[in-house]
Image (cartoon, rainbow, N blue to C red):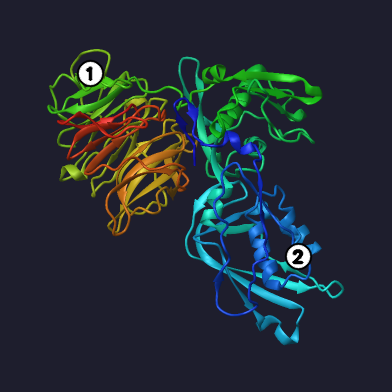
């Protein structure tokens, strides 16, 4: 939710204002609940304005068991930082053992509850069990990582009545918290925190490449401090094997640091413990860059980060402009051109920010008309490109800066039909080229390092089905794949590992669904550091276009305007650049921010931004 930039600032409507408390809504927790009978829903808290903080009421004197259960569930959806009010519904022992931060389970609706007298009833009037039930949608783990989920949810709460006070309290409960989808959307927000690719650098100075690691935070519970702590704690386990943090191990906020807020100059001071005190100038700049990229993803109100060590000693400070010099960030620099194939199947281009509809052939053999192409990919530096021949059999790489003959193909497919041959290739920021051969007799995912040489076969352990299309993220450590299995085309995202020491070669591991609601994905593109734009259908539905997060969650904001007959789509990590699609009905069209689809050319196909 809100992981990318619009108009030069990070997405996230209302987040900067979320720190202001404009009012408090009390969740009474006193609606009646029967001690037995049919399942009934606990009322899901209505959506509140993003500036309104929601607090729960503690249990009333002599509250019935049902009121205790409902009050506790409502307290889980409040903005109480440490769940102190929720703990008041528990016995002292249960409150000490309960760890709400361990996980969040998201259900389609608020959990239903039913009292079970079988364990107590008349034999034990001071004991009662309630069963919580629902349909799972997702989970957020202790690292704040989101994952889609499905299946039934069934857990139990056990209540006991204190012999002296006569008050009912919960004495046994599952770890973590549970809530309905609407409450989750009101309470949590997605933020990309940033690390550096372990084996990827770009530019003459070997800049490290920033990689987004999405996590979910409680949006009105000091999110700025939450996200800084999350960065310091390290990457999520899924991304961890392919990224590094510049913070020394054990770095944390100083004890008693309190809430972090920027000053009136949009400068945030982050006090760190002594583990960070020995960081050198370059390392400290990388540390500050990680925090600045992350915080600007949360709110546009931070322009400078200052890192302090013990005794309030400044370790380093960093502005936005300097951060962009420290690390390569896909969302910072938009493409120079939009590329596509014209009616002669030549590679042509239009300035990326231009409103022109006049395209010119690119320099070199891909644009001279000597050979027809069916798909293309342009390197991130826009100095070279890869093209798949019109019959889908051959992959060529050529310069975009000089003329000359087309060299021999680097990859050749033996597939029987065009649909069974080479798919659209894809480049990462370090200049490596990826392509899938869809030949059913010899399906291969291939890597050509620096776009040259002998192709390496990329392993995909655990993958069932056939890869139909791939798009590598700019960072070179994440890949989106369209995989066909059993008549269904799904969108998966995997982690790229390059193990040169073992001799096993590169692999795409731990594939996970990024669009669980779609069963026929026909086109996709990266559209930011942590999201993709996808064309597909739900079961029994019509074609639609939507944004999805790499973790499988749905971002805030609406979907792109509807467009029929979409066969290809392309976007940039810098989402100030228009979305572009190829439609059978309208040809090449683009969608500028805040506008409707506009025709570029009728007779064109295969639009692509660099990547």
Mark 1 — residue?
A: 362
Q: Is residue 488 left or right of residue 79?
A: left
Query: What's the CA distance linking mark 1 and mark 2?
Result: 74 Å
Q: Nearer the viewer, residue 214 or 62?
A: 62
**Where the C terminus falls, by quadrant?**
top left
Q: Quadrant of residue 361?
A: top left
Q: How many marks?
A: 2
The answer to whether residue 453 shows anywhere in this view is yes
Q: Circle 2 is placed at which residue position?
A: 60
Quarter of the view holding residue 563: top left
Please tell me how crowded label 1 is: few (under 14), some (14-19), or many (20+) other residues with Cα within 10 Å: many
Q: Residue at 60% of width from left, 23% of height from top?
A: 286
- Tags 1 and 2 in contact by the CB under 8 Å rule? no
Question: As rendered, which of 499 and 296 lies closer to the eye?
Answer: 296
User: Can residue 153 be seen in the rendering of this structure?
Assistant: no
Q: Earlier in the sequence, mark 1 or mark 2?
A: 2
Identify the residue at image location x=76%, y=73%: 160
Residue found at the very far top of the displayed protein: 402
Question: How would you rate the neighbour count of disc 2 (Cα within 10 Å): few for under 14, some for 14-19, many for 20 or more?
Answer: some
């Amino acid at each position: 939710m809100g992981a990318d930039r619009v108009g030069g600032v990070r997405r996230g409507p209302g987040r900067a204002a979320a720190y202001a408390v404009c009012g408090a809504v009390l969740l009474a927790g006193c609606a009646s609940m029967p001690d037995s009978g049919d399942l009934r829903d606990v009322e899901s808290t209505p959506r509140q304005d993003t500036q309104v903080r929601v607090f729960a009421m503690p249990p009333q004197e002599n509250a019935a068991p049902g009121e205790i259960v409902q009050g506790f569930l409502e307290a889980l959806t409040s903005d109480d930082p440490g769940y102190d009010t929720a703990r008041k519904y528990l016995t002292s022992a249960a409150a000490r053992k309960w760890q709400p931060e361990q996980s969040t389970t998201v259900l389609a609706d608020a959990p239903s509850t039913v009292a079970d007298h079988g364990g107590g009833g008349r034999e034990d009037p001071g004991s009662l069990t309630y069963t919580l039930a629902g349909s799972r949608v997702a989970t957020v783990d202790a690292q704040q990582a989101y994952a889609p989920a499905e299946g039934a949810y069934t857990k139990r709460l056990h209540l006991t009545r204190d012999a002296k006070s006569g008050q009912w309290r919960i004495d046994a409960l599952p770890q973590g918290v549970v809530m309905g989808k609407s409450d989750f959307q009101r309470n949590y927000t997605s933020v990309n925190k940033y690390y550096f690719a372990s084996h990827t650098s770009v530019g003459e100075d070997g800049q490290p490449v920033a990689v987004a690691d999405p996590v979910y935070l409680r949006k009105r519970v000091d999110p700025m401090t939450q996200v800084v702590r999350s960065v310091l704690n390290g990457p999520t386990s899924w991304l961890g094997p392919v990224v590094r943090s510049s913070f020394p191990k054990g770095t944390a906020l100083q004890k008693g640091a309190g809430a972090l807020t920027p000053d009136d100059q949009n400068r945030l001071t982050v006090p760190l413990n002594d583990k960070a005190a020995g960081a050198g100038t370059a390392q400290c700049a990388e540390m500050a860059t990680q925090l600045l990229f992350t915080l600007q993803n949360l709110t546009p109100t931070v322009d400078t980060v200052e890192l302090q060590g013990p005794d309030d000693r400044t370790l380093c400070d960093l502005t936005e402009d300097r951060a962009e010099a420290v690390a390569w960030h896909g969302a910072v620099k938009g493409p120079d051109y939009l590329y596509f194939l014209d009616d002669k199947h030549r590679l042509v281009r239009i300035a990326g920010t231009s409103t022109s509809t006049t395209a010119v052939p690119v320099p070199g053999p891909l644009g001279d008309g000597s050979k027809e192409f069916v798909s293309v990919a342009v390197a991130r530096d826009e100095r070279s490109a890869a093209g798949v021949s019109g019959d889908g059999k051959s992959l060529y790489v050529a310069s975009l800066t000089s003329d000359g003959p087309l060299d021999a193909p680097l990859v050749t497919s033996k597939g029987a039909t065009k649909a069974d041959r080479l798919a659209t290739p894809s480049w990462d920021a370090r200049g490596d080229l990826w392509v899938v051969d869809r030949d059913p007799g010899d399906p291969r995912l291939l890597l050509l390092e620096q776009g040259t040489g002998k192709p390496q076969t990329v392993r995909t352990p655990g993958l069932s089905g056939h890869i139909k299309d791939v798009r590598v993220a700019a960072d070179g450590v994440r890949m989106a794949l369209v995989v066909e299995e059993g008549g269904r085309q799904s969108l998966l995202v995997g982690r790229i590992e390059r193990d040169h020491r073992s001799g096993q070669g590169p692999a795409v591991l731990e594939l996970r669904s990024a669009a669980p609601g779609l069963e026929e994905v026909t086109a996709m593109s990266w559209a930011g550091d942590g999201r993709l734009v996808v064309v597909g259908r739900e079961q029994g539905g019509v074609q639609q276009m939507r944004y999805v997060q790499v973790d499988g969650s749905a971002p805030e904001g609406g979907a792109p305007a509807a467009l029929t007959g979409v066969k290809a789509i392309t976007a940039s990590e810098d989402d100030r650049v228009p979305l572009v699609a190829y439609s059978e009905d309208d040809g090449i069209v683009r969608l500028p921010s805040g506008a409707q689809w506009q025709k570029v050319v009728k007779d064109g196909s295969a639009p692509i931004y660099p990547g």
